């Protein structure tokens, strides 16, 4: 399991929806944001980290039918993940998360759905 999938599963554990995989039709994705109706959350890498950093900058993108739903979901993700230090879902790696940029608007997609994002620094911790 990679860092993006662990972050996606962590968002699911926080109550933001099921992580989509081969068996589950969820609304939380990692690595790609598919064309799907309704609230969609995607975890993507902003970078792969620097050598020895044991982590990366991660971009959380939220798409929803209304501007309000997209903003409020993205803002809640930023608030609930900022300062996290503990075990991520998946392989149970210990990590720390801090928000680099809170919820900010990205405009709308071709179907006029609102897009928001927040940026996180996710680092693996020893022990």
Image (cartoon, rainbow, N blue to C red):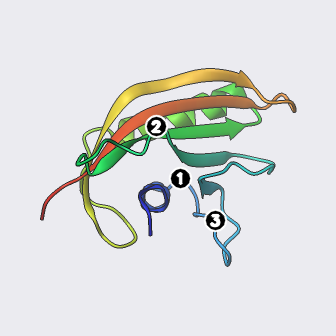
Label 2, on which residue?
A: 76
Q: Horizontally, is 99 left or right of 4 in the view? A: left
The tag on residue 16 is 1
- Which residue lies most toward the right here? 111
* Relative to 61, residue 26 above or below: below
User: Marks 3 and 1: which is nearer the front?
Assistant: 3
* Residue 91 appears in the figure: yes
* Relative to 91, residue 49 above or below: above
Where residue 21 sits in the image (x, y, percent)? Answer: 64, 70
Q: Are marks 2 and 1 in contact (CB under 8 Å)?
A: yes
N-term mark: 3 or 2:
3
Q: Residues within 10 Å of mark 2 (few under 14, many from 20)?
A: some
Look at the image and tell me in which quarter the N terminus lies.
bottom left
Q: Horizontally, is 107 left or right of 121 in the view? A: right
Mark 3 vs mark 1, CA separation in Å: 12 Å
Q: Residues within 10 Å of mark 3 (few under 14, many from 20)?
A: some
Residue at left 54%, top 22%?
A: 104
Q: Horizontally, is 113 left or right of 62 in the view? A: right
Which of the two residues, 81 or 94, is positioned nearer the viewer here? 94
Per the image, label 1 sits on a secondary structure element best described as loop
Look at the image and tell me in which quarter the C terminus lies.
bottom left
Where residue 77 sits in the image (x, y, percent)? Answer: 46, 41
Q: Residues within 10 Å of mark 1 (few under 14, many from 20)?
A: many
The tag on residue 36 is none
* Residue 75 appears in the figure: no
Label 3, on which residue?
A: 20
Residue at left 76%, top 47%?
A: 38
Where residue 56 sits in the image (x, y, percent)? Answer: 36, 44
């Amino acid at each position: 399991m990679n860092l993006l999938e662990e972050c996606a599963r962590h968002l699911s554990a926080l109550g933001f929806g099921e992580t989509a995989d081969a068996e589950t039709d969820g609304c939380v994705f990692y690595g790609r944001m598919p064309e799907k109706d309704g609230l969609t959350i995607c975890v993507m890498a902003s970078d792969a980290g620097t050598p020895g950093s044991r982590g990366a900058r991660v971009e959380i993108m939220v798409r929803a039918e209304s501007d309000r739903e997209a903003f409020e979901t993205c803002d809640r993700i930023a608030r609930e993940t900022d300062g996290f230090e503990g075990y991520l879902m998946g392989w149970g790696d210990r990590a720390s998360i801090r928000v680099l940029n809170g919820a900010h608007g990205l405009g709308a997609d071709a179907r006029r759905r609102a897009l928001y994002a927040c940026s996180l620094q996710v680092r693996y911790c020893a022990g």
